[in-house]
Image (spheres, rainbow, N blue to C red):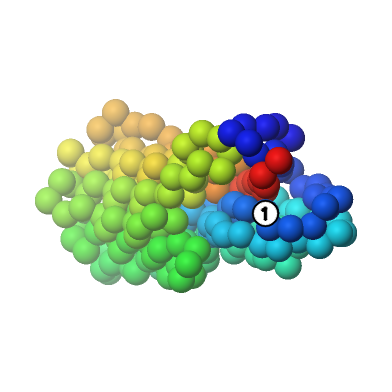
Amino acid sequence: VTTSGGYKIHTFTSSGDFTVTSGGNVEYLIVAGGGGGGGGRGGGGGAGGLLSDTYNVELQTYVVTIGGGGVGSTSQGVNGNNSSFGAIIATGGGGGGSSTSAGSNGGSGGGGGDSSSGPNAGGTGISGQGFAGGTSNPTSSKESGGGGGGAGGPGYPGVTGTGGTGGDGGDGLQKGISGSMVYYAGGGGGGSGYSSGALKGIGGLGGGGDGSQHSINTGSVAVSGTVNTGGGGGGGTYADDPRTTGAAGGSGIVIIRYAI
């Protein structure tokens, strides 16, 4: 619990209780856990759903739940977990797709995984919480994953003409409820292809993790979403252990403030 600019601010980075001793309006920010990145030509994980508004609280105790990020995988990334403030629920981000699958639906959608038979679509987001994931690279010989969607915009598709560069994650939204302007809920970047010049997708502003880059282009592993931002995890690249594995999504956060 902190104070800033005439407000008392309750920041929950793990689950707990918010006890009201004087009813009235409060402002809230709820961010769910980000989705895990998919593996092997994988899409980036979608950001956790973001909700921000005011709410009239009564004299009671409200349960606050912080959703964990979804696990990254060598196949389909796992969806993030929901975060909530009482009955108000933000939905976990969608997991990134693998070499055989589309991105999963969620608060923001996971990016599509790629395959030699053609592109896969990103998952859908929930209106008012986040955006869709990007489609994987449509060039069948230069597969790369799409970026996960963010709270502020959709994930980008995998890039053609580059040997298979992963799509960047969608940016999150900047909020000042904590007393400082901070970005939350960015999508994870898609994994790169395996041709010369193929680069990883970059995670979106708001804790999105970068995708994995194949060793033919100075390899790097996928990066997890940042904790307590709801950022999506980066997607894995193709046939290049340990860089084939997508990374985990970041856990969520709940912030509640009111005038003092």
On the image, numbered disc 1 is attached to which residue? 26
Q: On the rendered image, what quadrant is the C terminus found in?
A: top right
Given residues 151 and 76, the one toward you in this image is: 151
Query: Does residue 165 appear left or right of residue 79 in this picture?
Result: left
Does 191 sit above or below residue 4? below
Given residues 222 and 148, the one toward you in this image is: 148
The location of residue 74, given as percent across then percent down, is: 50, 51
Q: Quadrant of residue 87?
A: bottom right
Furthest-left residue in this view = 161
Kind of residue at disc 1: Val
Does 61 sit above or below residue 249? below
The location of residue 3, given as percent across then percent down, is: 67, 32
Q: Residue at x 45, y 62 (%)?
A: 130
Res. 13 in view: no
Q: Residues within 10 Å of mark 1 (few under 14, many from 20)?
A: some
Q: Residue at x 44, y 45 (%)?
A: 174
Q: How many tags in the picture?
A: 1
Query: Does residue 48 appear left or right of residue 17 in this picture?
Result: left
Q: Residue at x 55, y 48 (%)?
A: 230
Res. 166 in view: yes
The location of residue 144, given as percent across then percent down, is: 29, 53
**Helix, strand or loop for disc 1:** strand
The location of residue 106, given as percent across then percent down, is: 52, 66
Given residues 32 and 211, the one toward you in this image is: 32
Q: On the rendered image, what quadrant is the N terminus found in?
A: top right
